[in-house]
Image (spheres, rainbow, N blue to C red):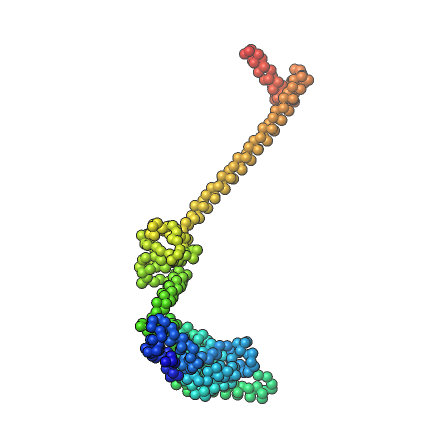
Amino acid sequence: MPLPSPSKEESHDDWMDRCMANDTMNEEYSENDQRYAVCQSIWDDDKDKDNKDMKTHDIYVYGDIWNDQSDYASEWGVVSLSEIVKQMNGNKNAEEFIVHIHSRGGEVDEGFAIHDVLVASGKKITTIIEGMCFSIATIIALAGTDRKMTENSNFMIHNPTGGGFGDAEDMQKYADKMKGYQDKIIDFYVDKTGADRDKIAKLTEEETEMSADEAKELGFITEIIETIKAVAYYNINPKYKTKAMENELKDLKKEVTGLKAFFTTLFNIKDNGAKNLKLLTADGTELTIDTEDTKPAVGDKVSVSEGKKLENNYVMPDGETINIKDSIIESIVPKKVEDKSESEEIKTLKQKVADQEKEINDLKTTNESYKTDIAAIKKDMDFVVENVKSTFVIDDKTRIALKGTRGEEDPVAEAIARRKERKELASKNK
């Protein structure tokens, strides 16, 4: 008998249930793991699988909205009507268009044109704001019956702005045109949200930027997407789980745990419910600490990834060192902090010692200079004394004359007399 094949109306789960229970499949592939793999392969190869999976089609309004219908406009970040139509034609059989918006806005007419073509498609339209939804992009956002906005996105409305040229009559025409756009946008907001017109008019006049909560309160959006809940979900029927699938799930959990440990360390995230604390060392090694605390302590058991050797110590990003013995934390040594005040004190003392040593050396130099000068003076004095003694004789008449002239004893004569007395005294003592 031929192997079964999926029907167009059949979902993936229904197909897998039917395929796994099929008699021919059980005869050909008795092992569950093998049969599951073949059923999955048949589903993947089926020519109509795109029609089963693509009931929704994503359209992206990422960029500025301008009337540029050229083929290369999107390469410059321009979103135009032709670009949106091209995206819509990517899956004409889709039941729902999901329009993702991240735009600063642009031309009023182009924004309304994109809104109208989406609504006229007859598909269910869901709009999701992911970042910015400013100015005319808000009109496109209102094309959705379900209008969602991520919690950290921003929504902004204002009166249309522009510039014209010409004479007074031309400028008045342009002003009237801008006023018409302004009234049209306000009326459109009121019709879509049910908000009070005066309030909307005041908000547009003041160019109001609002959060997701504020946008929802005014009726611009219908739902706020909490980012933390945006997770992928893969449902596997337990009776069809294979060993290989279980191993893949284990590997996935291990990778997620590693990422959690990385960001926990990087951003110092507190995890009060942690039973196995994950830490990254300064060199990137992941340590698993057997503790319910948020930081390691002496006595905690430590392990590393399979295939890696547990070292005796690890330096952490903050400079702290964890010392390990027999897989147990033996000690945790904080980063050594230099005592800057003590260092400055020692530096000051060293400078004082250096200054004093210099002063001593200067004094020694000066002292040597003094010794030299004194020796020279002594030599000169000895020369003078010897010459006076040998060539200069003062008789009594001259001494009296000198005494009368100076009014005092002759100092030279006195010095000679004292020198003579010392010599005579020295001779007696020999």
Farthest residue toward the right?
391
Q: Nearer the viewer, residue 403 or 120?
A: 120
Quadrant (top left, top right, bottom left, bottom right) of the C terminus? top right
Q: Position of 371 compared to 237: left or right?
A: right
Q: At which x and y percent is residue 144?
A: 42, 83
* Of residues 262 and 109, the one drawn nearer to the viewer in this rendering: 262
Residue 147 position, x and y percent, is 40, 81
Quarter holding the N terminus?
bottom left
Q: Using the image, determine if residue 363 lies above or below residue 347.
A: above
Give the vertical position of 319 relative to 394 (above or below). Answer: below
Residue 203 seen in this snapshot: no
The residue depicted at 52 percent of the width and 83 percent of the height is: 82
Residue closer to the observer: 17 or 159? 17
**Residue 289 placed where, x, y %?**
34, 57
Residue at image position (31%, 72%) is: 239
In the rendered image, the vertical position of residue 65 relative to residue 253, given as above or below: below
203 or 256, nearer to the observer: 256
Estimate the x, y position of residue 59 in percent, counting from the top left.
46, 80
Residue at 39% across, 64% down: 255
Identify the residue at image location x=53%, y=87%: 177
The answer to whether one can see residue 299 in this image is yes
For residue 312, above or below residue 143: above
